[in-house]
Image (cartoon, rainbow, N blue to C red):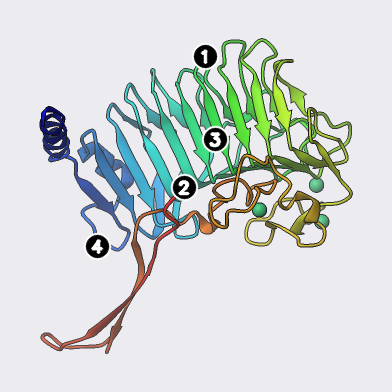
Amino acid sequence: MKKFAIGLFALMFVLASSAFATIRYVSTTGAGGYTVINTALTAAVSGDTILIGPGSYTISTQINEVKRYTVIGAGWDQTLITMTQDWYLNNSNRHSFEGMYSNSNSSFNIFNTVDSTTFRRCRINETVNTSSILWTLGRSLTLEDCIFTAAYTSSSVWQVLISQSNFPTTIRNCVFANTGTSGAMKAIGGYATSGTVELYNSDFLNFQIPLVLNTAGAPLIAINNVFHDWMASPSYGSYNAISTWDYNASTTLIPPGTNALLLAGDPFVNYDETANYVHGTTDLHLDPTNGAACINSGHPSLLDFTDGSQSDRGVYGGPKPLVDNGIPNYPWAVNILLNPNLVGVGTPVNATATGRVGPQY
Ligand SMILES: [Ca+2]
Ligand SMILES: [Ca+2]
Ligand SMILES: [Ca+2]
């Protein structure tokens, strides 16, 4: 009975503490309470969810709100955010970003200690030599189901620069692609004071050197990843010597560690080594013939959540495969048709909504 009483009290506390959490809807059409992302974030309080509907938005004023929030777009094919100023997180924890495309000459960045942030089902393209996610002072970071593209020409820039505060980073089912021609381009960087980096089921495309983790930092655990379309003089890069590499696959350069697979050619349905990653054209699903060696050959303790089979290598493998278009686990209406669509005041209309929701993982 005592247990029950405590449980009831805990439930009441959760209900009470969420009473002030608000869902704020940003919409280009004016259907929501806001048309500008900055305005919604300024109005928000910690715990709020900011929904960003289908359409194109700009971040032209730096975001620097000292509050915790969740941001959910309608998918990276629907919610486009052009960032010309940094989106800073500041002194607050458990932010979450989901379901959007950021095309940016700026970064997701931190001012002060920020803990437990997640980017999932996001596509982030960088148009200049700056990091997509600059986490130098931040703490635990999780990236899942994200596509990172850039064409850096500088060797002192990284798509994701992880924490230098000994906190862990987890990366699952992400694509890191160099869309340019420079071998200076790097995917992930870390420091001597960086924590563990767990890297599962990610694809690295068109790099000379994808990883620049400091050899004095905590170990890398790399499992089920695929590397392809290497530039001349390729190298996996730097990382702690006691790192674990297991069940990775690559063309050209056999991966370090155990159960490594050297592929004869690219394992994908469609990838053009000359064009590099082209969003909407490239298809990184495993080809049934060319990619057969990667299918059901991933780490045997990682089973595919969707069909129970042994995990595959690459972004569509692992327990929870990449979700196409970054469709979030949140129900969205992406189109509403009215019939008839030309009416006078008081005329009844039939409304047909087209909705979408991503898988519940
Ligand atoms: Ca090819
Ligand atoms: Ca290439
Ligand atoms: Ca499988």
Circle 2/circle 4 CB separation < 8 Å = no
Q: Is residue 84 visible?
A: no
Camera-side residue of 192 and 17: 17
| Residue 8 disc label | none
* Mark nearer the viewer, 2 or 1: 1
Query: Is the CB–ligand 2 distance for label 3 below 8 Å?
Result: no
CA–CA distance in space, label 3 to label 1: 20 Å
Q: What element carries label 3?
A: loop
Count of numbered tags: 4
Q: In this view, does 164 lie above or below 153?
A: above
Q: Is mark 1 on a helix, strand or loop?
A: loop
Ranked by sequence position, the earlier of labels 4 and 3 is 4
CA–CA distance in space, label 2 to label 1: 32 Å
Q: In this view, does 227 lie to the left or right of 91?
A: right
Ranked by sequence position, the earlier of labels 3 and 1 is 3
Return the x and y of residue 297 as percentages of the image width and height: 74, 47
Ligand 1, image quadrant it occupies: bottom right
Q: What element carries label 2?
A: strand
Return the x and y of residue 84 as percentages of the image width and height: 47, 40
Residue at the spot 57% in from the left edge and 39% down from the top edge: 172
Ranked by sequence position, the earlier of labels 4 and 1 is 4
Ranked by sequence position, the earlier of labels 3 and 2 is 2
Quickly name the residue at label 2.
82
| Residue 166 disc label | 1
Ranked by sequence position, the earlier of labels 2 and 4 is 4
Quickly name the residue at label 3.
132
Q: Is residue 355 left or right of residue 207?
A: left
